[in-house]
Amino acid sequence: MLLVPVIAAAIAAAAACVAPVPPPPPPPPDAPTLEVSVVRDGLARPWDLGFLPDGSLVFTERSGAVRALVGGELRLLGDPPDVNGLGEGGMLGLAVDPDFATNRHLYTCFLSNLSGTHDVRVVRWTVDAATTSITGRADILTGLPVSATSVGRHSGCRPRFGPDGYLWVTAGDAATGTNPQDPQSLGGKILRIDRDGDPAPGNMGPPFRPEIYSYGHRNPQGLAFRPGDGTPYEVEHGPDCNDEVNRLVAGGNYGWNPVPTDGSAGYNELVPMTDLTEFPGAVVATWSSGCPTIATSGAGFVTGPQWKAWDGALAVAALKGTQLRFLVLDASGAVVSEGAGVTDRGRLRVAMQGPDGDLYVLTDADPGAILRVHPV
């Protein structure tokens, strides 16, 4: 008797997996026209980017490279030998220190095989005065879990400095069923630390590890802070349905718990992304994709009158959906409208507004590219 709903759920999930991604919603009439140009191409699957105070662009490539684009010149800053590029791993997120002008620090997150072990870790580097190399490695946060059966799966790691001055880090669940709800695992969490890797005040208390800000996440790969009020939002991949954008609250449980119902040590992807039956107090998503997913990844807010209807919107890069999804939020943080742009450039990994007001986007390809999106 119990097999019927299980089989039905499996069939539904399989159908969602192969279902085509629906056409993206059209932009509203008062949205800007988006002019897209290539800043740099020929890149090896770029994953994250940031800007230095002088306007130079720094970015990562999953193969391990940390690069800078300085006055049009492409430079290799570093290529750590312990980067493991298997599966969804490799060199991933990057954050520029808000005090870079004085300390010259940037931070990367990658899957490491240092000393023969595997983990995802956050490393602080110092960029030399000429912006030609990174040195002074300091591994400030280690031990983010890696899948025991599929190295690199769900190792999403996106660091961003918040307006509070602390480094926020997304941590995937490593495709391990127990991690998201385990208070002693860093997997399936949003973490919040200082520049040395110590826990930030205001995080969760015991029995949770002190680095943990929120839990119950699947594979979060986007993190952005709303201009004006600094509200944190994260973006994460769903299984076959329901990619999510979530407004983060301290101590929040976001309801992902893929532990098999038979108690085995597996990974049950048929459970809801936000399981309100098991966790009635779970935080409900601000936005979800429905079925099928569009594979939402990195995101950033855009501001300025040139963005017209999308001034203040969250621009979410989508991989499978091959688009930027612009989400317009009201004062309470609810999504009131959405539309898509840049639908003809393939898989998009992350979007970030540059100091010139344009949006900079990385394509997830090899060769990949840095795109500039200019609103008119």
Image (cartoon, rainbow, N blue to C red):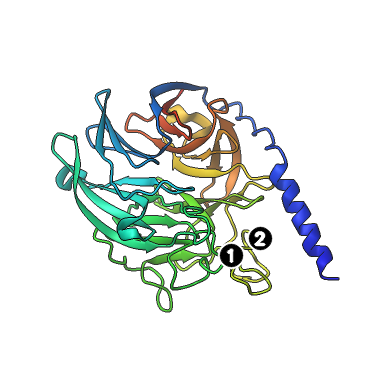
The vertical placement of 67 against 254, above or below, is above
Q: Could you tell me the amino acid type at mark 1?
A: Gly
Quickly name the residue at label 2.
Answer: 272
In primary-sequence order, the first of circles 2 and 1 is: 1
Q: Nearer the viewer, residue 87 or 106?
A: 87
Looking at the image, which residue is at 62% across and 52% down?
A: 239
In 3D space, how far apart are the residues under numbered discs 2 and 1 (Cα atoms)? 8 Å
Q: Which mark is residue 285?
A: none
Quickly name the residue at label 1.
Answer: 255
The vertical placement of 243 against 276, above or below, is above
For mark 1, give the secondary structure. loop
- The residue positioned farthest toward the right in the image shown: 1
For mark 2, give the secondary structure. loop
The vertical placement of 317 against 219, above or below, is above
The vertical placement of 349 against 123, above or below, is above
Residue 288, position as x, y percentages in the image = 62, 49
Query: Does residue 193 appear anywhere in the picture?
Result: no
Q: Residues within 10 Å of mark 2 (few under 14, many from 20)?
A: some
Looking at the image, which residue is at 35% across and 51% down?
A: 109
Looking at the image, which residue is at 37% across and 56% down?
A: 168
Q: Residues within 10 Å of mark 1 (few under 14, many from 20)?
A: many
Q: Could you tell me the amino acid type at mark 2?
A: Pro
Residue 133 is left or right of residue 252, and the answer is left
Residue 115, position as x, y percentages in the image = 30, 60
**In which quadrant of the rendered view does residue 78 lie?**
top left
Residue 357, position as x, y percentages in the image = 37, 30
Query: Does residue 154 appear anywhere in the picture?
Result: yes
Looking at the image, which residue is at 58% across and 63% down?
A: 256
Whether the residues at callouts 2 and 1 have beta carbons within 8 Å, the answer is yes
